């Protein structure tokens, strides 16, 4: 694991963040003593469950945006924006 001093980290933050983005783990030191570790974020695929459902054929999705309801609700009164404004008062 590579170490970097606080002053160097401050002066060359973009450089060190590029290193972390590339997969490096950095130990931040202050006067030679470790105080923190910078590591890349592990990104989880939050939509893995959805991809599994598509693979099993439980749902259909062509990758596009939803088209919406075939029978959208009709507005028979005030505009929603007016209701929200009244509610804020």
Image: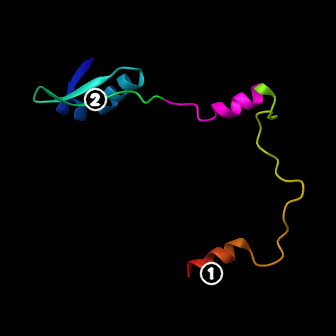
**32 horizontally vs 10: left or right:** left
Q: Secondary structure at mark 1?
A: helix
Instruction: Provide residue 82's location: percent of width, then percent of height.
Output: 68, 77
Residue 17 location, quadrant: top left
Q: Residue at x 10, y 29 (%)?
A: 31
State whether residue 60 is above or below residue 72.
above
* Residue 70 image-quadrant placement: bottom right
Residue 44 coordinates in the image, percent (x, y): 53, 31
Q: Is residue 71 left or right of residue 31?
A: right
Find residue 77 and name its label: none
Over which residues does the magenta segment extend? Answer: 43-55
| Residue found at x 85% / y 53% | 69
Of residue 64 and residue 50, the one placed in the foreground of this image is 50
Q: Residues within 10 Å of mark 2 (few under 14, many from 20)?
A: some
In front here: 18 or 3? Answer: 3
The image quadrant where one finds the C terminus is: bottom right
Residue at position x 40%, y 20% from top? 23
């Amino acid at each position: 694991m590579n170490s970097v001093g606080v002053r160097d980290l401050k002066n060359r933050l973009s450089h060190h963040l590029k290193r972390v983005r590339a997969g490096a783990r950095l130990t931040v030191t202050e006067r030679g003593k470790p105080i923190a570790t910078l590591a890349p974020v592990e990104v989880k695929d939050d939509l893995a469950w959805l991809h599994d459902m598509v693979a099993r054929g439980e749902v259909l999705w062509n990758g596009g945006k939803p088209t919406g309801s075939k029978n959208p609700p009709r507005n028979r009164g005030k505009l929603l924006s007016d209701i929200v404004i009244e509610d804020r008062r």
